[in-house]
Image (cartoon, helix red, strand yellow):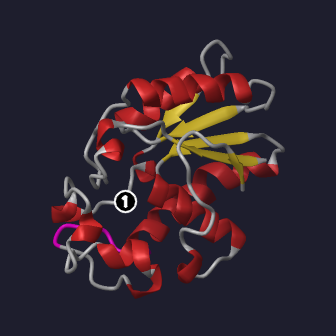
């Protein structure tokens, strides 16, 4: 079985800042969310956890799996989508011409990412490669795999696994610290 979970809250989440690949740590609320998830999901079996190398995801994984002896393996292909020059922008929807807004409002029209940003195709390519190389062989062995990641990165995995079109990229509702079976 494949499970995914998004990291706990950060100060940038609270400020509505675009994080992307900026390495922002969990805040106190994010740590509490991960601890609550640890208790809530304690009976769910995982053989291995793959995790984004960004600190907010790593710390979430460490709290979530504390005391369970489950290996946590980081993989750079699980890093959050890059928003390029828009990383750190606060309240992007209040900026009518912010070039990253189409990603959130109509992802199928996100064809011209801002400078330094990743396209959806690039995101799908790297997460798809990760799934084929790391996850699929383990699932074929009957193992239970957990991925701890980010909103856009997790959404790309859900879309690929469920065969969803880009217009439904955000349809799963990627909430902080909510475990999802994919």
Left-right relation of 170 to 48: left
Most extreme residue toward the top is: 67
Q: Nearer the viewer, residue 177 or 74?
A: 177
The reply, left or right, for residue 47 in relation to residue 127 is right
Magenta range: 115-121
Viewer-nearest residue: 24 or 27: 27
Q: Main secondary structure of the magenta part?
A: loop
**Which residue lies at the image location 55% right of the left edge and 49% below the top edge?**
175
Q: Residues within 10 Å of mark 1 (few under 14, many from 20)?
A: many
Which quadrant holds the C terminus? Answer: bottom right
Q: Relative to residue 13, is residue 34 depicted above or below?
A: above
Q: Nearer the viewer, residue 60 or 136?
A: 60
Rendered residue at 81%/26% (across/down): 43
**In terms of secondary structure, where does tag 1 sit?**
loop
Residue farthest along the right direction in this orientation = 142
Q: Is residue 119 magenta?
A: yes
| Horizontal side, residue 44 vs residue 179: left or right | right
Whole-percent x, y for residue 153 in the image = 47, 57
Residue occupying the point 65% across, 50% down: 135
| Position in image of residue 86 (x %, y %) | 20, 63
Give the number of callouts: 1
| Residue found 84% across the figure and 44% down from its top | 142
| Residue 168, horizontal then vertical, whole percent | 58, 77
Q: With respect to residue 7, does 116 lie above or below?
A: below
Answer with the quarter of the image where residue 157 lies. Answer: bottom right
Q: Which quadrant of the figure has residue 111?
A: bottom left
Q: Is 20 within the magenta?
A: no
Q: Position of residue 106 (x, y in %)?
A: 44, 82
As drawn, is 39 to the left or to the right of 99?
Answer: right
Q: Which residue is mark 1?
A: 81
């Amino acid at each position: 079985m494949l499970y995914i979970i998004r990291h706990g809250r950060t100060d940038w989440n609270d400020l509505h800042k675009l994080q992307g690949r900026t390495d922002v740590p969990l805040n106190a609320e994010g740590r509490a969310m991960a601890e609550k998830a640890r208790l809530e999901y304690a009976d769910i079996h995982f053989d291995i956890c793959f995790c984004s190398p960004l600190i907010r995801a790593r710390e979430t994984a460490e709290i979530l799996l504390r005391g369970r002896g489950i290996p946590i393996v980081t993989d750079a292909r699980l890093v959050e989508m890059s928003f390029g020059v828009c990383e750190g922008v606060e309240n992007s929807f209040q900026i009518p011409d912010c070039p990253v807004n189409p990603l959130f409002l109509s992802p199928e029209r996100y064809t011209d990412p801002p400078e330094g940003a990743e396209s959806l195709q690039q995101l799908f390519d790297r997460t798809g490669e990760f799934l084929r190389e790391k996850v699929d062989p383990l699932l074929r062995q009957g193992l239970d795999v957990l991925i701890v990641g980010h909103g856009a990165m997790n959404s790309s995995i859900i879309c690929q696994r469920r065969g969803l079109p880009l217009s439904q990229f955000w349809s799963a509702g990627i909430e902080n610290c909510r475990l999802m079976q994919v």
